[in-house]
Image (cartoon, rainbow, N blue to C red):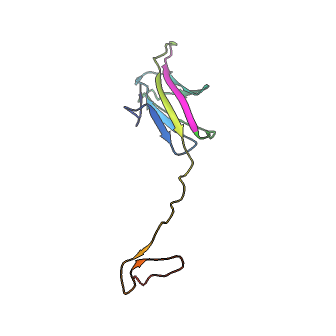
Amino acid sequence: MNILDYTGTKFINSPIDLPTIGGDSGEKGKTGVIVQLYIGIKLFEVPVDPKTGLFTWTATEPFPDGDYSVSIRTLDRAGNLSAPTLRTMRIDTTPPDAPELLFLTDDQGPKTGLLEAGQTTDDK
């Protein structure tokens, strides 16, 4: 099984609290296949498109910021389970601190150099 867009990494980073996870189940052309997606201890069963073998799941309830264990495995119609694909999903919706302006320099006109608080520039 291949988790789309995350090949070669063990982490799924999401800047939103309603993540979408999708991939290729490896079961193209087969009907009745589902993907069992565990996030932490919650199980989500996701149908697989029989034409393409692809699956997509989007959270319907927000996840709080944090790291979550993700396990994904395929279940076929006969009840056979694949080996799991394991990832860590990180939800981080906290924006960084605002930048702090340390200094401002006037570099054109007759007045040049560092500006103090409240001064104006003659730059055009």
Picture coordinates of residue 9 (x, y %)?
Answer: 40, 32
Please tell me whether residue 66 is drawn above or below residue 99 in the rendered image.
above
Q: 26 or 10: which is nearer to us? A: 10
Please give left or right for residue 116 compared with residue 40 in the image. left
Location of residue 98 in the rendering, given as x and y in whole percent from the top left corner: 53, 59
Number of marks in the image? Answer: 0
Q: Position of residue 89 (x, y in %)?
A: 51, 34
Residue at image location 54% in from the left, 43% down from the top: 92
Magenta residues (range): 66-77
In the rendered image, residue 9 lying in the magenta stretch gets the answer: no
Q: Is residue 89 above or below residue 107?
A: above
The residue lying toward the viewer, choosing from 59 and 78, is: 59
Task: Classify residue 108 as left or right of residue 39.
Answer: left
Q: What residue is shown at x 46% (from left), y 69% (from top)?
A: 103
Residue name at image x 36 percent, y 85 percent: 109
Residue that appears at 47% across and 25% down: 86
The quarter of the picture where residue 2 lies is: top left
Q: Which of these two is toward me, 106 or 11? A: 106
**x, y percentage for residue 50?**
45, 26
Check the picture and name the quadrant holding the C terminus.
bottom left
